[in-house]
């Protein structure tokens, strides 16, 4: 970058030479009528809110949902797969907002998440509003109104994300500095080509988005079908023909006055405690934990769970002072926090912490596993209504279990597993299509910013002319890397109010 002391005396040719990325620093080859430049050279402002964390100064109770006479607070949670949503942020009452600095964004601004797990997420803010802006977000204002959609798509692409994160600081809280943002290399086509790229991306990515929405609907259908299979299993509908072929003289229809729902006469209602051994976990002393395999494996919660319900636990920690023990094959259920109701099967004898309970059937474990799976949502609801969901031993003891004969239990499990196998195979095909769409989307974006979408016109005037125009208009406003904390008085797009 040109130094401020010299920028007014430098010629456009000198500024252009500095603005062009040398061949040795170009990430990849682009068409001859494109140029590589850096984000700062096509921007009139790249900065961020500094020195103020609203969440540390305002009580959580005052961070209301949208109310009359309030100002939105934009945070990294506003970013999503589609870029940015203004419907998820907090709102702060005006009477409180007056005491704190705020930022006025005009109709177009690019917002970039620069701290933490959401680092690299890009948002396109295109409505005029007064708002609070979190310190983990950088603001990018471009010189050209017509370039916003192009630059936004580039920063979201795989190529753009590589450039954003190239200089990411690997710390406990990953961070990208404003200086590094300004240095991001940008492939710059002529303005007409930028528009053609954006139009083609809207068309192609729009079709992919529609396909993804259909896939998501299909996945939800699979979830509903699974729930339907389990509901039929534990109401006796799946084994109606089996009972006709294997009649029973037993009749338990009058044993309970209050029944959760109607079941076959040969079935009976039992409480979970009656047909199983329930063991509520207890965390051992933290000093006894280790990752070297010394002692007995420890299952504290979802960290040691397999990804899917009824998959198998993994080993990550051990304890030399075990408390409560589960056996191999026991059903494990999370009983605390947001994962309440999540289920796994113990792969080994282990110690269970207070976030987990084990359930061991007295008769047939698989039948009980599927019954508890069918109750997962209900179990979670038992713990809601508090800040921290928590399922008690009493909640588990009193779960209602419809109990057929052992042969019918085994027949139910056989049918359920066959049906779920078919569902899972179909779901795997759907998820494979989803993965293919993700790869296709990445490929389209990659081609777009390499000039390979078939939209480029090599006879168009080189984008060097475009870059010259930008530099000519803003040569007195270019902010150098050394002066990254200073903002020109001529940058009227964003103002800080006290």
Image (cartoon, helix red, strand yellow):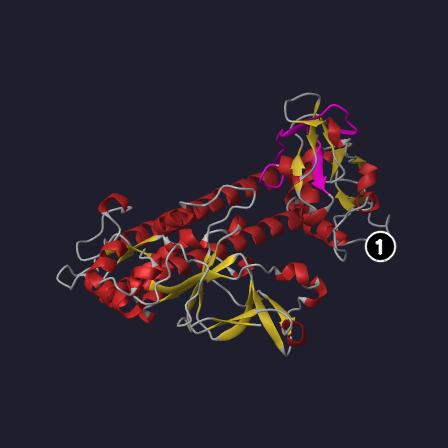
Residue 252: x percent and y percent?
83, 45
Residue lying at the far front in this picture: please name it.
5
Q: Within 10 angstroms of label 1, few (less than 14), some, or many (20 or more) residues?
A: few
Task: Give the magenta range.
Answer: 306-334
In-image side of 281 versus 306 (left or right): right
Residue lying at the far top in this picture: please name it.
294
Q: Could you say whether the residue bearing mark 1 is in a helix, strand or loop?
A: loop
- Residue shown at 45% from the left, 47% from the top: 431
| Count of picture labels | 1
Residue at the spot of label 1:
258
Residue 99: x percent and y percent?
65, 71
Relative to 478, residue 376 above or below: above
| Residue 181 visible in the snapshot | yes
Residue 428: x percent and y percent?
47, 43
Of residues 144 and 372, the one nearer the viewer is 144
Relative to 71, residue 6 above or below: above
Residue 199: x percent and y percent?
30, 65
In-image side of 54 versus 363 (left or right): left
Find out whether residue 310 is within the magenta segment. Answer: yes
Residue 154 sits in quarter: bottom left
The C terminus, quarter of image:
bottom right
Residue 403 sits in quarter: top right
Find out whether residue 425 is within the magenta segment. Answer: no
| Residue 453 visible in the snapshot | no
- Residue shown at 79% from the left, 29% from the top: 323
Residue 260 sits in quarter: bottom right
Of residues 245 and 320, the one nearer the viewer is 320
The N terminus, quarter of image:
bottom left
Relative to 447, residue 58 above or below: below
Of residues 184 and 160, the one nearer the viewer is 184
Of residues 449 and 467, the one nearer the viewer is 467
């Amino acid at each position: 970058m040109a130094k401020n002391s010299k920028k007014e005396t430098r010629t456009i040719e000198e500024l252009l030479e500095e603005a062009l990325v040398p061949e040795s620093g170009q990430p990849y080859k682009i068409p001859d009528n494109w140029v590589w430049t850096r984000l700062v050279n096509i921007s009139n402002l790249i900065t961020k809110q500094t020195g103020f964390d609203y969440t540390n100064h305002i009580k959580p109770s005052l961070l209301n949902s949208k109310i009359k006479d309030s100002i939105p607070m934009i945070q990294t949670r506003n970013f999503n797969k589609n870029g940015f949503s203004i419907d998820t942020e907090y709102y702060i009452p005006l009477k409180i907002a007056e005491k704190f600095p705020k930022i006025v964004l005009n109709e177009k601004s690019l917002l970039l998440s620069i701290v933490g797990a959401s680092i690299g997420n890009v948002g396109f803010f295109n409505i005029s509003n007064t708002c609070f802006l979190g310190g983990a977000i950088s603001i990018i204002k471009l010189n050209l109104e017509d370039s916003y959609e192009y630059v936004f798509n580039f920063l979201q692409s795989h190529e753009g994300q590589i450039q954003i994160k190239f200089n990411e600081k690997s710390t406990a809280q990953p961070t990208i500095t404003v200086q590094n943002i300004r240095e991001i290399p940008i492939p710059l086509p002529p303005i007409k080509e930028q528009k053609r790229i954006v139009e083609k991306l809207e068309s192609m990515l729009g079709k992919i988005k529609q396909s993804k929405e259909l896939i998501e609907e299909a996945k939800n259908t699979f979830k509903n079908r699974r729930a339907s299979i389990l509901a039929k299993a534990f109401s006796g509908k799946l084994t109606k023909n089996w009972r006709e072929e294997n009649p029973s003289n037993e009749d338990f229809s009058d044993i309970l006055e209050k029944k959760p729902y109607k079941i076959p006469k040969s079935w009976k209602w039992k409480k979970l405690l009656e047909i199983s051994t329930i063991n509520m976990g207890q965390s051992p002393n933290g000093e006894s934990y280790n990752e070297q395999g010394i002692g007995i494996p420890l299952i504290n919660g979802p960290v040691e769970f397999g990804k899917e319900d009824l998959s198998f636990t993994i080993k990550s920690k051990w304890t030399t002072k075990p408390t409560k023990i589960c056996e191999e094959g026991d059903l494990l259920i999370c009983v605390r926090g947001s994962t309440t109701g999540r289920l796994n099967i113990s792969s080994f004898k282990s110690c269970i912490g207070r976030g987990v309970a084990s359930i061991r059937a007295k008769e047939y474990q698989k039948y009980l596993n599927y019954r508890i799976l069918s109750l997962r949502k209900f179990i979670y609801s038992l713990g809601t209504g508090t800040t921290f969901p928590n399922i008690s031993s009493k909640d588990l003891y009193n779960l209602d279990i419809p109990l057929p004969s052992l042969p019918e239990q085994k027949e139910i499990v056989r049918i359920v597993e066959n049906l779920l196998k078919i569902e899972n195979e179909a779901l795997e095909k759907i998820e494979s299509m989803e993965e293919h769409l993700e790869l296709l989307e990445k490929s389209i974006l990659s081609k777009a910013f390499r000039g390979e979408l078939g939209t480029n016109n090599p006879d168009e005037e080189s984008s060097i002319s475009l870059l010259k125009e930008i530099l000519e208009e803003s040569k007195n406003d270019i902010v150098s890397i050394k002066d990254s904390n200073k903002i020109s008085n001529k940058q009227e797009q964003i103002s800080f109010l006290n």
